[in-house]
Image: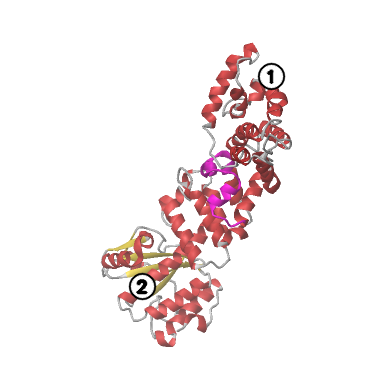
Amino acid sequence: MSWFAPLPDGFPKFDKMLSTRDAVKVIAPPPVLALGERLRSLYAVSRETGYQQLGSGDLRKLPYAYFIDGLPPLAEVEPELAIRYWAFELPQALLTGPSRVKRWLRPLYFAYCERFDAADPAFQRFADQLRNELARASGAFAGELRRLQAESAFFDPAQAPKRLAAQFIDRRLPIDDWLEGNLLWPEFTNGAMGQAVFRAILAVDGVKLVDAHAVDAVLGWCSRMPVPVVKTSHRVELATALLRPWIGRPVSDAIKAKLSRFFIDAYGDPRLRGHRLVQWDGVPEEVVRVLLRWLAGETLRGFMKILERTADETWRYRQRFWMAYYDADHVEEAWLVLGRSAMWMARQMLGRQSAAGLAELEGNADPNQSVLLLRIGDLIFTEWSHNGSLRAYRDGTNGPQLYAPHYSAAELRAMVSLDFHQGVNERPQLVHANSANGTWQRKARDFVRRRTGIRMHDREILL
């Protein structure tokens, strides 16, 4: 007979307390730069005494002082202290319980992310030492860091940005879920490693960036930046990454509208000289032309809406004709010039974004009149509303230039058109005659073919 009650098989409350203390939670780092500067000063003062007065916390937080902009790495300034940390203090701490291990690993993890610099040999050595020590650490937090290394080479500076970029695109997760899955905090995207990952995202195979989720993910990352992306070092690369994949590739209306709105809002309208010379400076011309083509489609549709509203009896035939060339990817640029009343109507119909890219028709012109300027190959066309004629000019000659803010109606009419009639008619411009039978459409189509080599069939251009 025992005088004592049997001992329990386990200690559930104690076990629960230990597991809670070692729980892996996503937390943001402390102010790494401020801590690092304070610790550098403390270490310098302690150097003469062999760092004897340093407390455990001062040693545990040493990674925060390892890299400070404009200063040599800590290992060069305080070599004895760095050796002591890597050879004795850190290995000893990693032999203790999981909770203490986590407290010592966190400064390493945060310093690695916040001071990330794959091009710095000293940072590469820091990463090598971190990986070596991580291999022997115990506890849930150490296990999660090893998982990151296994999944994305997280602690290999040369590989991590590319691997994380591919993971970010391929896993198709909301950005907050992706961050949490990698033990990363919301502001990580704006830190040194986050910026390296974003650069790698912009460098992935363009085929991956035509997916709607990928577009949303990249734009979502941009929305977290503390300053507009156009004021960052990513300006050129972002526009190139999101627009280049659409060269020669069909795009959905949803993605076209989303990217058009983003770039107009963030970079400004590339049709306007001020924006083209500043925000779009350095973006390859073929990339800018992707957006110009999309905006040309908006301009064409806007012109047709105005024709419809003003009861122009040829609007359906003109719409069929010009949209056929646009849908075949032959209309590269378009610009809409509006009389006073037509401008008011356009702003009511098209909304803020579309109406922002409009020019004013001045001089002796009907206030309801509008003129569509568009480019196909090296031809510039002017298409007048209200039964006005179609005219054509060689780009770069004495014809009208695209994207001016104002146009004189008299000057536009005075510019001598190329001849649509091969010398048969007295006037070179083309009147929209006999639309129902396709008379003017075929003559305009044949003119384009002779001048550019572009061929279109009757079934494409006629109602």
Which residue is identified by label 2? Answer: 305
- Tell me if mark 2 has few (under 14), some (14-19) or many (20+) residues whose alpha carbon lies within 10 angstroms of its own: some
In the rendered image of this protein, does residue 6 appear above or below residue 122?
below
Q: Quadrant of the C terminus?
A: bottom left
| Quarter-of-image position of residue 112 | top right
Q: Between 76 and 57, which is closer to the camera in this rendering? A: 57
User: Relative to 251, is 303 on the left or the right?
Assistant: left
Residue 200 pos. (x, y %): 61, 48
Q: Which mark is residue 80?
A: 1
Cα–Cα span, label 2 and label 1: 76 Å
Question: Which label number is shown at residue 144?
Answer: none
- Residue 52, given in percent of the width and then of the height, sits at 63, 14
Of circles 2 and 1, the one toward us is: 1
Query: In the image, what residue occupies the spot 69% across and 39% down?
Result: 6
Residue 426 makes an appearance in the image: no
Magenta span has 399? no
Residue range corresponding to the magenta coloring: 171-195
